[in-house]
Amino acid sequence: MAIYTRGGDRGDTALLGGGRVPKSHPRVAAYGDVDELNSALGVARAALREGDADGLDAGLARVQEECFALGALLAAAPGAAAKLPVPYDSGLPAAAAARLEAEIDAWDAGLAPLKHFVLPGGGTAGSALHLARAVARRAERSCVDLAAGGPVPDGVLVYLNRLSTWLFVAARRANKTDGRGETPWLGLGPARKPRR
């Protein structure tokens, strides 16, 4: 059996639960960005050191599972999400965002307080987590755009908003674990103005 279906060769795609929409539809953009986010999370997991003493890989694995469920919610035709398995039949459970918040608080307590914005970077894992954070923000913007035209499953916007913060703190934590410093952004003071 071929893995390709040819069903989308004319630029449209099927939604879970029935119906077809153009591949440029905001719903497709939203779950496509969540799919890209999940791939970025996979890259971050691959970048972690062998052994992962901080246990960050387990958290990333859980987030990948949650993002896959989130993508299914977004790929469902309006009203069809109720046919998804419990607990996703009514959206993304509030416990998912609450767990992210608890981890953010615990991790942030072990980091130096922020006095400046930091530039994305550091070690390989930290940099990959910063990139995943930026993709999470894009996925959130796509879901906000989708919500402007109709309902978005419960919990999706809150989860994505919290996830980008979780990834930022995870990047800082990974850089600390790897002994990599952070580069503060000091602004565009007189000595830093770009040349024209």
Image (cartoon, rainbow, N blue to C red):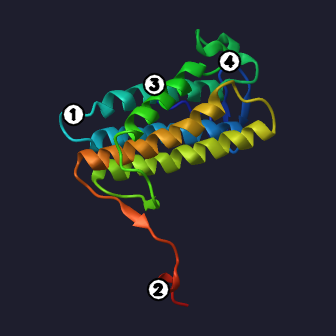
- The residue nearer to you, when weighing 90 against 68, is 90
Residue 132 place in picture, x, y as percent: 45, 46
Helix, strand or loop status at disc 4: helix
Mark 1 = which residue? 53
Res. 58 in view: yes
Label 2 Cα crowd, 10 Å radius (few <14 / some 14-19 / many 20+): few
**How far, Cα to Cα, is label 1 from label 4?**
38 Å
Q: Percent from the top left, x then y, of residue 108?
A: 41, 40
Residue 156 image position (x, y, % from top left): 63, 30
User: How crowded is the residue under tag 1: few (<14 C-alpha within 10 Å), some, or many (20+)?
Assistant: few
Residue that carries the numbered disc 2 in the rendered image: 191
Q: Residues within 10 Å of mark 3 (few under 14, many from 20)?
A: few
Please give the name of the residue rendered at 47% of the width and 39% of the height, measured from the top-left corner. 166
| Residue 103 in the figure: left or right of residue 122 | right
Which residue is pictured at 58% across the width and 10% down the height?
A: 85
Disc 3 marks which residue?
A: 65
174 or 7, which lies in front?
A: 174
Q: Earlier in the sequence, mark 2 or mark 4?
A: 4
Query: Mark 2–mark 3 contact, CB under 8 Å?
Result: no
* 122, 66: nearer the viewer: 122
Mark 4: which amino acid? Ala
Is label 2 in contact with label 4 (beta carbons under 8 Å)? no
Quadrant including the N terminus: top left
Tell which residue pokes out farthest to the top in this image. Answer: 86
Question: Observer-nearest residue: 43 or 75?
Answer: 43
- The residue that appears at 74% across and 25% down in the rendered structure is 19
Residue 10 seen: no
Asked which quadrant contains residue 46, the reply is: top left
The three-letter code of the residue at mark 3 reads Glu
Measured Cα–Cα span from mark 2 to mark 4: 55 Å
Q: Which residue is mark 4?
A: 81
